[in-house]
Image (spheres, rainbow, N blue to C red):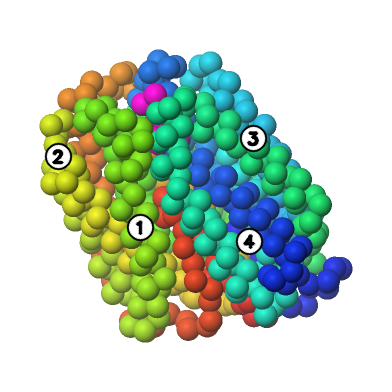
Amino acid sequence: MSGRVVRASEPASRSELRVGEGRGRWVLLATSLGSSMALLDGTVVNLALPRIADDLDASFGGLQWILNGYTLALAALILLGGGLGDRFGRRRIFVIGALGFTVASALCAVSMSVPMLVGARVLQGVAAALLTPGSLAIIQASFAPEDRARAIGLWSGLGGVGTAIGPFLGGWLVDAASWRWIFLLNLPLGIAVVAVAVRHVPETRDPNATGRVDLLGAVLGALALAGLTLGLSETSWPLAIGGLALLVVFVLVEGRTAHSLVPMSLFSSRVFSGTNVVTLLLYGALSVVFFLLGLVLQGPLGYTPLQAGVATVPITLAMLLLSSRAGALAERIGPRIPMTVGPLLVAAAMLLLTRIQPDSSYVTDVLPGIVVFGLGLALTVAPLTATALGAVDDEHAGIASGVNNAVARTGQLLAVASVPVVAGFAPGAMVAADDLVDGFHTVMRAAAATAIVAAVIAWVTVRRTAAPTAERPPAWHCAAGGPPPGIEAVSAGE
């Protein structure tokens, strides 16, 4: 979320909100709807990709960029968005993000070509980078300290409900109407978010957020990710090497900048560094599952969008039912074992998914991998995020959360971009059904190997001791959208 944790010393220019009061409920509604919009558009679009391909004559590379255009902008700018909110007003930046997301969604809905849709998706990602960090930061800054844990628990739960119905609603809209409706749905939601936020959400800032905004770091980070993404997706090694070189420059510049987007001092912690490497690898591995599985189910296996959405519901149920229990388990026995066993289960699930063939049965060939995948994610994600935040001082919990979220988005971005290289698909070409299944199997094996590496790194770098046991709200989230930004930072140091 935001790059800063709201401190107790922040002066209150307004009365503190309570969960049980009318204005507090309006704030929860605005922030929950806003963050849910951005989260759902990062995941439900997967279900629409086959129909978009048919309608716009999109190649496999075009489908990649429909996802990656959004993720690239969000990954590159999410830390900047949090910093802008801290400095210029969280409500102001949140409303600008919601307005931008609504307009960009309308452009997505009326797109008549792949380049136009990709451009609109990039604009959506930019808007999401302004919208997403503000939602939790507003709650932390606006509610009374004794109500913050409950407020964020409700915020997380409402987001969980939205994500749980996403596969049903998204699949039904694509099936019954058109893929364009998954974007049109954002228009009334976005207008409602802006109206409620302007009327009911108080303005807050971080008085300690001083100095210049790190625009150079944001530009270097965006160019580095763009170069790497283009290089991988187009199999252009000069571009990839250029992106890697810019990434090195980004790290060097951030290490010398007083008010950097990413304080490099955080990475002096072995646990923080190791946990973020695990995040990069694990979220990269799971992103290719969500990207390719929908294409395989709706292509060679002949599922409708609604059937494909329902097919992945066991993942959502596992996260909904088991995430908080996994977090409690990690607090009792320490995060090392859950963060090792969880990625191994994810790897096993990916190998199970290689059994999928055009004539496969859902119950015997698809469901086992889906169930094990959900169990692996449920066991891993909450301990992983809590460990990343527990590895730094309380005063840095906000920026640590933002970095961990940006790392997750980066892993998703680069993994999806690398699919043609790993699968052997020709850049810009259409992919036949048999080739898609064969490439899916190859990518699943590579993703399983990546998850195993993540498990090894977790075992080596994460301490045996239990995670911090400070009281936290119950958290639920969709792992496909990145880790829950800042949930575990509630009341840190306050």
Q: Which mark is residue 241?
A: none
Q: Which mark is residue 187?
A: 3
Q: Going 45% across and 37% down the picture, which residue do you hit?
A: 170
Q: Residues within 10 Å of mark 1 (few under 14, many from 20)?
A: some
**Residue to which mark 2 is pinned:** 361
Left or right of residue 287: residue 7? right
Q: Are marks 2 and 1 in contact (CB under 8 Å)?
A: no
Left or right of residue 34: residue 14? right
The amino acid type, in three-letter code, at marker 4 is Leu
**Residue to which mark 1 is pinned:** 317
Q: Is residue 106 above or below residue 375?
A: above
**Residue to which mark 4 is pinned:** 136
Q: Going 42% across and 23% down the picture, which residue do you hit?
A: 52
- Along the viewing direction, whichever of 466 and 195 lies nearer the viewer: 195
Q: Going 57% across and 35% down the picture, which residue do you hit?
A: 185
Q: Are marks 2 and 3 in contact (CB under 8 Å)?
A: no
> Percent from the top left, x then y, of residue 169?
46, 40
The amino acid type, in three-letter code, at marker 3 is Leu
Give the residue at the far right of this rendering.
13
Q: Secondary structure at mark 4?
A: helix
Q: Secondary structure at mark 2?
A: loop
- Along the viewing direction, whichever of 179 and 385 lies nearer the viewer: 179
- C-alpha gap between disc 4 and disc 1: 24 Å
- C-alpha gap between disc 4 and disc 3: 22 Å
Q: Which residues are magenta?
A: 45-51
